[in-house]
Image (cartoon, grey):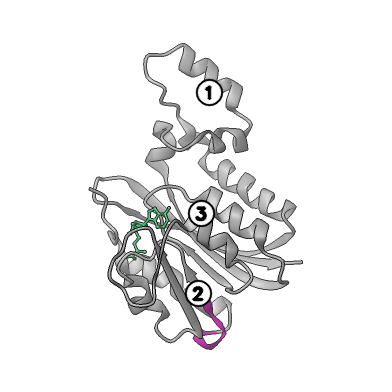
Amino acid sequence: MPTDNSSAARKTRLRQIAIEWLGGPSECRVLDTFAGSGFMRSACYGDCKAYLGIDIKDTGTPGQLIGDNRVLAPAHADHFNLFDCDAYNNPWILCDDILQQRTKKGRIVMVTTCNAIRLLMGVSPGYHWRKLGLSELIKFRQANTKKGAFPILRWHDDFIRIVLTDWRSLGFDIGRCIRTISARSGVGHKVRYYAVELFKL
Ligand SMILES: C[S@@+](CC[C@H](N)C(=O)[O-])C[C@H]1O[C@@H](n2cnc3c(N)ncnc32)[C@H](O)[C@@H]1O
């Protein structure tokens, strides 16, 4: 079973930095798209100006929206400036969908995660291969080996760079980015967390 908070101290620190980038809690309006039982709210976002949690499960947390973030989060893109995407997996499509819906100008921060082993195993959708421009290579590799696994980790940093370049094409300047905080999930997966400062132009 995955662990929701395998590395609470590092995850908390990353969010404190994100809050500082936005000018402190009084400037932060947080959309917590994988809110769980509200751990991040209590640990990091308690003093923030606004907070809305979303989770697909009913965790019994007061005020939390119950539903699929793929539907709910993009619809709220203009009402918040800190988007917390603390998935088990790789929420890059969700990040894209939120950014595509954002029309309001100015600074925002995207806090997200990357489960590298799932990228490595090819568990993540074709989105990642397409982003890397490797779709044909992947198909060739899958057709010629018993297992479909492909060493995408070799291109991990390139993948992140390509994602950020894509965010530029959605009308954002990229500011500060922290990428090196990593941890191990409950099943031994290496998970990296990112905070990226963006400016909607
Ligand atoms: C890694 S945990 C998040 C933990 C939480 N941020 C915390 O600090 O306790 C992932 C959470 O995302 C929720 N989830 C998974 N898919 C979702 C979706 N499509 N929409 C909304 N929530 C989802 C799960 O129910 C789970 O609570």
Q: Position of residue 124 (x, y in %)?
A: 45, 38
Residue at x 27%, y 50% (from the top left corner) = 2
Estimate the spatial distance between the alpha carbons at disc 3 and disc 1, rounded to whole Å.
27 Å
Q: Where is residue 53 in the image (x, y as percent from the top left)?
A: 42, 70
Locate ligand 1 by image quadrant.
bottom left
Q: In this view, does 187 lie to the left or right of 114?
A: left
Q: In this view, does 14 lie to the left or right of 161?
A: left
Is 91 above or below relative to 128?
below
Q: Is the CB–ligand 1 distance for label 3 below 8 Å?
A: yes
In the foreground, 162 or 63: 63
Q: Is the CB–ligand 1 distance for label 1 below 8 Å?
A: no
Is 46 above or below relative to 128?
below
Q: Is residue 165 visible?
A: yes
Residue at x 60%, y 54% (from the top left corner) = 97
The residue range painted magenta reads 24-29
Which of marks 1 and 2 precedes in the sequence?
2
Estimate the spatial distance between the alpha carbons at disc 2 and disc 3, rounded to whole Å.
17 Å
Estimate the spatial distance between the alpha carbons at disc 2 and disc 1, rounded to whole Å.
37 Å
Q: In this view, does 97 lie to the left or right of 191?
A: right
Residue at x 32%, y 69% (from the top left corner) = 9
Q: In this view, does 51 lie to the left or right of 23?
A: left
Kind of residue sitting beneath label 2: Val
Q: Is mark 1 on a helix, strand or loop?
A: helix
Q: Position of residue 171 (x, y in %)?
A: 74, 59
Q: Position of residue 16 (x, y in %)?
A: 45, 76
Q: Is residue 178 visible?
A: no
Name the residue that disc number 2 marks.
30
Judged by depth in the image, the label closer to the viewer, 2 or 3, is 3
Q: Which mark is residue 70?
A: 3
Asked if the residue at tag 3 contacts the one at tag 2, i.e. Cβ–Cβ closer than 8 Å, the answer is: no
